[in-house]
Amino acid sequence: MIFAGNFKTNHTRSSTKEYISILTKLVTNERVYIFPPSIALDKFEDSSIKIGTQNAYPTKNGAFTGEIGLEQLDEFDIKTILIGHSERREVLNENQEDIASKFKFFQDNGFEIIYCIGEPLEVRKNGEKAVIEYLLSQFNGIDLNYDNLIVAYEPIWAIGTGVSASIEDIKGIHKALKEVVKSPLLYGGSVKIDTIKDISNIDEVDGVLVGSACLDANKFYEMMSIK
Ligand code: 13P
């Protein structure tokens, strides 16, 4: 199982350092990724945990106020990025074209990409066929044959709401996605200690992308230990 934790706009530079040190001592054989806010990116040299960036601008450097590029990521050997998260699509207005060019840039630079897709509630209300069609449109311009790719399915209505998708829903969507996605497929959206067992037991789920329930290192590790 892959366990990826997205801090979003939580944790500081010092609390991230403490978090990574706690989690590093606990984690043994799981594949673990942490995405801290960009201000907290660092090398964390003695850790087996992969540190990724939640976002970056598709540039080496330049005049892009408020953004970070390759040069800033290289300083900390960051080679993993989240692209297409619904909060960037919905709140920060990144469209599919922006997302596809960001994907291409980081693919060309050899990054491991966790590419996120997910439908809003209006689409979900129209049934599974409509959901799949919507999700497939989020692959426009994306090279699904990229070998350093992980895909994360995160239904928007399940993110931060405490209401995870049902086991049947996750199974159905992941099964359909697996017909086009050959890379590992994560589920995200209100994954919690009480739901991890059922979710991780779904054959088509290769891991989870966790927001609020990853913010405490000990609790995130507890989640990893539940089989
Ligand atoms: P929550 O686990 O808080 O619902 O967030 C999921 C998510 O968006 C991870 O990227």
Image (spheres, rainbow, N blue to C red):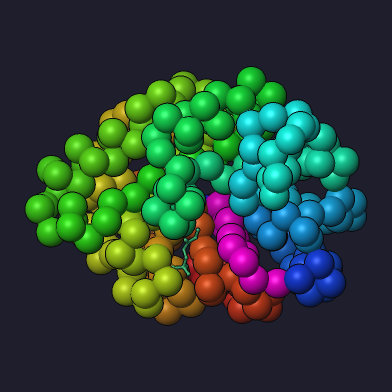
In the displayed structure, 219 sits above or below 101; it is below
Looking at the image, which is closer to me, 131 or 32? 131
Q: In this view, which residue lies farthest toward the left?
A: 126
Looking at the image, which is closer to me, 73 or 217? 73
User: Which residue sits at x=29%, y=41%?
Assistant: 135
In the displayed structure, 102 sits above or below 54; it is above
Snapshot quadrant of residue 80:
top right
User: Which residue sits at x=53%, y=73%?
Assistant: 212
- Does residue 62 appear in this view? yes
Left or right of 117 in this view: 123: left
Q: Where is residue 92 shown, x and y percent of the image?
A: 48, 52
- Report the magenta residues as a range: 2-11
Q: Where is residue 101 shown, x and y percent of the image?
A: 52, 27
In the displayed structure, 93 sits above or below 158; it is above
Residue 109: say if magenta. Answer: no
Report how many numbered discs are placed on residues in the image: 0
Q: Where is residue 14 shown, x and y percent of the image?
A: 84, 72
Looking at the image, which is closer to me, 91 or 122? 91
Left or right of 146 in this view: 132: left
Left or right of 213 in this view: 140: left
Q: Where is residue 93 shown, x and y percent of the image?
A: 43, 48
- Does residue 80 appear in this view? no
Left or right of 146 in this view: 196: left
Snapshot quadrant of residue 76:
top right
User: Which residue sits at x=48%, y=35%?
Assistant: 99
